[in-house]
Image (spheres, coloured by chain):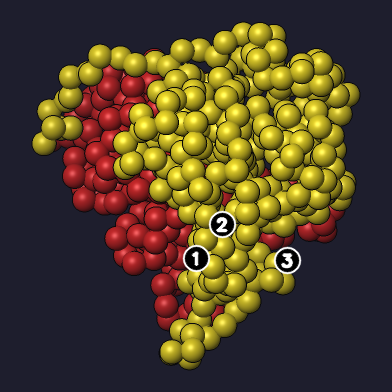
Amino acid sequence: MTDFSTDFTYDELILTTLARQLQDGDRVFTGVASPIQMMAVFLAKATHAPNLLYFTILGTINPHPEKLPFSTGNPHLFDNCENAITFPEIFDLANTGRMNVAFLGGTQIDQYGNLNMSIIGKDYNRPKVRLPGGAGGPIMIRSFQRIIAWRPNHSVKNLVVQVPFVTSPGWIPEAKGTRNGGPDTIITNLCVFKFNRQEESIQLASIHPGSSIELIKDQTGFPFKIPRKITTTASPTTREKEVITKLVDPEGIRKLLLQPPQ
Amino acid sequence: MVQQFIPDKCQIYLEGLLVNRLPMATVHEIIRAKRTGLRIVSAPNGLAVDQLIGAGMVAEIEFYFLGFMTEKGFASMRRFRSAAENGTVQIKESMGYAICMGLRAGAFGIPFIPLPDFRGSDLLTIREDYQVMSSPYNPKETVITVPALRPDALILHAHSADQRGNVVLDEPWSSFTLTTAQACNRVLVTVEELVEEGSMQPNQITIPHFLVDAVAHTPYGAAPTALNHRYEIDASHIELYQDAAKTKEGFDRYLEEYILSCSNHEEFIEKVGLPPSWVKKAPTQKTKEETK
């Protein structure tokens, strides 16, 4: 019998929902600017996925940082690690099937699962907004078997019909019949979407407590299917809450990065 | 080091990652030497790139991610953004594996290198040098080739060097740093400490002396970014920079106050204060799940 907590906070719900996408034995990569995803991996490993192997962008495997960092490039992610490889070797391992799950985001995500981390605007050379760049995404999005995207600030501006620039490709005609790109799951501050690569469709999988189908429809640019029976995103268990607050992030830095929707 | 080895229009590879050991002392030295027309190839090294662009040193930037997380959320690189949005710097957008593989090709002494297929990415429309090819061994397999990267100079901050120029980087990333050093024509290193020749074990050495052109003893040379086992991020100074860099005027004031008016990195550190000491706790007790 799972002991679901009735009393939980937004940050606990998000970390738990991200962590539950991971399975025991997964070999998981988190990239640049991903402290929330990093905490979710630590949570999964300390609860339902003890045999998970966590690869950081610094190349360390299963680190135990002595100080939980805001940046996933912080050298504390070298602390007490089991092994270490280097950045390009993460790609090498994914290309040869030795790693299977990556957290990969996009400032914008469209109905084809394309991610944009490059520009907002019409002219690439004179963009309205220059974005940071796609990091490892353009190749990782197809070399990993499962891609999970965390997209805070659910809005029509970032969940769009079509991105102006495809940094990391989703479902493209050239890849028909092969391992296709795009995320499998998008978790936002309002809900969880599942992407079905075979059917090339997006389905609403669950709604976070406090959110509503009307709000999600209003704030989503791309089309998505709504199941007949709408489920609520499962609450954190008492155990998960305890692991988050006592083990993963006792100083509560997650609360600075995860603020509940207004 | 900069005077001798970094001419105008030099192509520079910047080592470091996000907030870990960016070669800030050398970056400031380049700005003080007023080198212009630089072509930068960078790891996710936002802070260094932003300052070089803001100071007007950069003609071209090849990159794959510029920015990093702080406790205030995502730190966007404002001088880079402004230059890109106004078209004042040549943008060569790439991706992590393409730059690493380009450096591998440079280190291996081959002109280009194939990557797994990533068609569908618009990077192929903006990078005419990235070519879609069939494998010569199996025409059904598609690869994408990228040219070798052979930058004129690698700029790196490391833990120590001996008097001969053997360099030690005290972190597990170091084997790729050697590849990078092999790809670059010159290797310019600032180090936290100089040690006696013969005091390093051969298997500790990250870059052997015959690949290293210059070493400068520069304590806190990565500050305000961190260095493994030595010092933490100076978060308050990074925040001060981020606030300043929101506008050109603010950046120019920062440039004058913290870079141009300091004659060297020691004066910069005197001005901003020592970075926080490295946090090292006694080993914590592992939970039952972790020890399984």
3 or 1: tag closer to the N-terminus: 1
Marker disc for residue B108: 1
Q: Say what secondary structure mark 1 lies in.
A: helix
Q: Is residue B27 left or right of residue B137?
A: right
Name the residue that disc number 3 marks.
B126
Say few, some or many: other residues with alpha carbon within 10 Å of mark 2 (under 14 / 14 to 19 / 20 or more). many
Q: Amino acid at mark 2?
A: Ala
3 or 2: tag closer to the N-terminus: 3
Above-or-below relation of B149 to A257: below
Q: Say what secondary structure mark 3 lies in.
A: helix
Q: Nearer the viewer, mark 3 or mark 1?
A: 1
Question: Which quadrant is home to the N terminus of chain B?
Answer: top right
Say few, some or many: other residues with alpha carbon within 10 Å of mark 3 (under 14 / 14 to 19 / 20 or more). some
Q: Colour of chain B?
A: yellow
Q: Amino acid at mark 1?
A: Phe
Q: Which chain comes out red in the rendered image?
A: A
- Foreground: A78 or B185? B185
Q: Residue B198: name its quadrant.
A: top left
- Foreground: B139 or A162? B139
